Image (cartoon, rainbow, N blue to C red):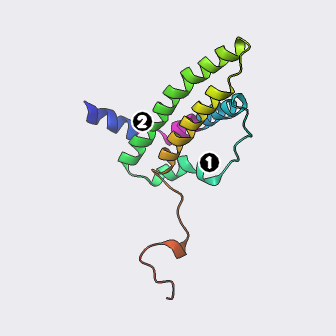
């Protein structure tokens, strides 16, 4: 049963993943405002992650899907709680910062699954003098 779930995750559309990835970053942008942080700069590493998954193996894609679902499971109730706090007129910056740190750490773990390709000079096994 678990193997079937993993296969289903690995075969899900990368367009769907791209959509979910963007959605999480929209939520993260909202979170930065609640945490009173400056907007995070957009980097190629983050933007290009869904495309890099196309070259990843099935296990990496499965882990990416599970990771994005885990981050979403953390962000949804967290943002709801933060909105409740602000609706009461209370300052939500400290708990928002804590959630931002959790998001950032979880996202870093996902990004490590499919890091950006290094340049040709950085590839192992190539003699730079040749």
Q: Is residue 34 toward the left or the right of residue 58 in the image?
A: right
Inter-mark Cα distance, 2 to 1: 19 Å
Say whether marks 2 and 1 touch (CB < 8 Å).
no
Q: Nearer the viewer, residue 94 or 75?
A: 94
Local crowd size for mark 1, using a 10 Å CA cut-off: few (<14), some (14–19), many (≥20)? some
Extreme-bottom residue of the structure: 130
The first of marks 2 and 1 along the sequence is 1
Q: Is residue 125 magenta?
A: no
**Residue at the disc numbered 2:** 66
* Residue drawn where x is 33% and y is 37% of the image: 6
* 20 over 112 or under it: above or below: above
* Residue drawn where x is 45% and y is 55% of the image: 55
* Residue drawn where x is 50% and y is 33% of the image: 71
- In what element is the residue under mark 1? helix
Local crowd size for mark 2, using a 10 Å CA cut-off: few (<14), some (14–19), many (≥20)? some
Q: Is residue 103 toward the left or the right of residue 30 in the image?
A: left
**Magenta span covers which residues?**
11-21
**Residue at the disc numbered 1:** 47
Asked where in the image residue 24 lies, by quadrant, the reply is: top right
Q: Nearer the viewer, residue 110 or 36?
A: 36
* 85 over 38 or under it: above or below: above
| Percent x, y of residue 53 | 48, 49
| Percent x, y of residue 119 | 56, 70
- Magenta region, main secondary structure: helix
Marker disc for residue 101: none
- In what element is the residue under mark 2? helix
* Residue drawn where x is 50% and y is 56% of the image: 115
| Percent x, y of residue 130 | 49, 88
Q: Is residue 75 toward the left or the right of residue 40 in the image?
A: left
Extreme-left residue of the structure: 1
């Amino acid at each position: 049963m678990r193997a079937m779930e993993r296969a289903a995750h690995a075969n899900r559309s990368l367009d769907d993943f791209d959509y979910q990835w963007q959605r999480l970053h929209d939520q993260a942008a909202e979170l930065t405002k609640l945490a009173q942080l400056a907007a995070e700069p957009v980097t190629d590493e983050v933007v290009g992650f869904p495309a890099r998954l196309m070259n990843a193996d099935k296990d990496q894609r499965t882990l990416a899907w599970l990771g994005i679902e885990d981050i979403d499971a953390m962000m949804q109730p967290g943002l709801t709680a933060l909105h409740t706090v602000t609706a009461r007129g209370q300052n939500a910056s400290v708990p928002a910062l804590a959630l931002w740190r959790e998001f950032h750490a979880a996202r870093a773990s996902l990004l490590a699954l499919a890091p950006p390709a290094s340049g040709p000079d950085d590839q192992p096994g190539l003699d730079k003098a040749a």
